[in-house]
Image: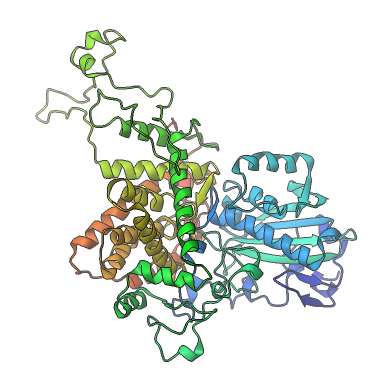
Amino acid sequence: MLSPRSCWTGFRHIARLPYLLKSPIPPRWLSRTLPSRTLSVPSRRAYGDNDTKSSLETGPDKPEHAVISTFDLFSIGVGPSSSHTVGPMRAGKIFINDLLELGLLEKVEILKIIVRYGSLAATGKGHHTPQAILLGLEGRSDPETIDTGTIPLRYTAIQTNKTLLLGGKHRISYDMDRDMLWRWDQVLKTHPNGMRFSVFDENGDLLATNEYFSVGGGFVVNEKTKVDENLFYKGVDKSSVHGARLHQHIHADSSSTAVGQQVRTDSEQPPYPFKSGDSLLNLTRVHNMTIAQIVYDNERSFGYNDADIHNKLMRIWAVMDGCIRTGVHTRETTLPGRLGLRRRAPMLYRRLMRGFYPGLSTPHLQAIEGGDQFAGAIGAPDGDARPSDLSSATHPASSPQGPGHSHTARVVGSFDHPILPEPPRKTMIPAMEFLSCYAIAVNEVNASGGRIVTSPTNGAAGVIPAVLKYIIEFVSDDPEKSIKTFLLTAAAIGMLFKRGSTISAAEGGCQAEVGVACSMASAGFAACMGASPETVLQAAEIGIEHNLGLTCDPIDGLVQVPCIERNSLGAVKAVTAAQLSMAADGVYSVTLDEAIEAMRLTAADMSVKYKETSLSGLATTVKIPLTVPAW
């Protein structure tokens, strides 16, 4: 029997990626799992051959600088995952746009999807990967604009009707069980999150195929971009993207100017390229600029004017702030999924708004605002008992609930012992309480598939909004200035991690998500406190140093446990890291570049079981239904 490759008489590399294969694939190949060789293209280097090395294995000494657009690093999308939801949705839309450009869409009768390799296959269903791919292939869905409330209905319709409207105009038969294949038994060295799309005509001839990698933060790369960090934009239509966002190579004619010094400005080069924390720090010294100012001027080279940058930053913050408000205001009591986790953000926020005096609820206080809208106080979830007022606390018998309902705490322990038991008590640490509430609110919205900002990923999306919200509410006297300073500074740190290591949990575990977000937020907080660039980078270093080795082992493949609480702790840790750096008076032992390299090495050495695959750790020790009730 002829192998599939022997059926090919030629190929042609077309446009921005499908490969048009001129010879037919026998129909018998369509009735079973398509082997890897069936859909191979001549250049196999990006598809996991032995000579292919991932970005983690090649080391940090790459020719590209680290500068990308802040608005690619922070982008608006949907939950629960940037690499498993946002990326696959973009990949599907890119593939359909290619088919449209090639005039092939109307010829498609059969679509085969292989979701394979490691994390994407192992936890994709819990991360809504099937929904994302199919809605992306329908062509009418963009992560930033899709109505999140319609996703479940549209996905159910596809499953029930067994049809798919490709590009919003060409309907084909599509059976999920037959046409979407999961290959969690294979792992690519290039990147664990691989997808392959293939389309065939009515005779079973292969029209086009392509393989995509979702590399974290919503970024999608493929064979043409080699996953070598050459594609640094999140747009679907490459032709509409400013040229400076497509390339990161430093000009040969600027070789005499070291990275970290300004080079000539043109359409293909930002004015202040940097590739490390050290070169970024050198830029701030040479030009007497803050990190935020460096990033701001680089954004101008991407085709944005001052008004564009202002509006985009305010838009990002509006979505972050709206996400917090949605999280604390929702009337939904549980998160989707088998865990049945109760939403805690509304209850936490209600308790914070009662103040320090247990007898005083505060119905007159304004709740968190979203944009310019005013909202009244947020009611406690059903079953959340109010503390009794001052008089009933003093005179239990006068409680409206009568004797026996005075909420007297029970002391646990023996009184006939040299070590007397401590009576139950509560304490309030306002910063910690608010940071935790804000972060949990964002990640509960993310876990339910709501609107989210990748910061720099969805799984870590609560850390940065929580810290920035705290600054605006309790520290800043100029909120707009703080928003710009914080986001631009945090973006610079995120760029360094993306170039020097990874922001993908499938490559580096949770240190690549919550760890990186903590580092970014630490830097942003220090910058808003007026710290020097050197102190800002040290804050970022402390933020990541104490997250090194953090694993990603989500229970049941859901972005819920331990992800939601981990964001809460990440936000608290970020502020602590910033405070430590500002108190260090310029004395430190580890640089940010050294910490980023340590993270890269740790990620390369980490077992795949701890890289968003739910194959070990909490994902295997915690039984479902939960041993401890989720309520």
Q: How is the image coloured?
A: rainbow
User: x, y (%) of residue 624?
Assistant: 51, 37
Along the line of sight, which residue is nearer the eye, 465 or 308?
308
Q: Quadrant of residue 245?
A: bottom right
Picture layout, residue 383 above or below residue 287: above
Residue in the image at 64% along x and 51% along y: 132
Q: Residue furthest left?
A: 418
| Residue sitting farthest toward the right | 203
Residue 511: x percent and y percent?
41, 59
* Vertical side of 421 occupied by 441: above or below: below
Task: Residue 417: name its quadrant.
Answer: top left
Q: Which quadrant of the rendered structure holds the C terminus?
A: top left
Q: Is residue 184 visible?
A: no
From what the image shows, is residue 430 above or below residue 43? above
- Judge whether 227 appears above or below 388 on screen: below
Q: Which residue is painted at 29% across and 22% down in the image?
A: 387
The structure residue drawn at horizontal position 55% and vertical position 57%, both measured from the top left corner, is 83
List x then y, in percent, for residue 344: 41, 35
Taking 62 as reference, is 127 left or right? right
Relative side of 138 to 559, left or right:
right
Q: Going by the image, does 549 lie left or right of 309?
A: left
Which residue occupies the foreground of this view, 227 or 234?
234
Asked whether the viewer can see residue 227, the reply is yes
Q: Position of residue 26 (x, y in %)?
A: 87, 64
Q: Pick whichever, 378 or 208, lies toward us.
A: 378
Quadrant location of the N terminus in the rendered image? bottom right
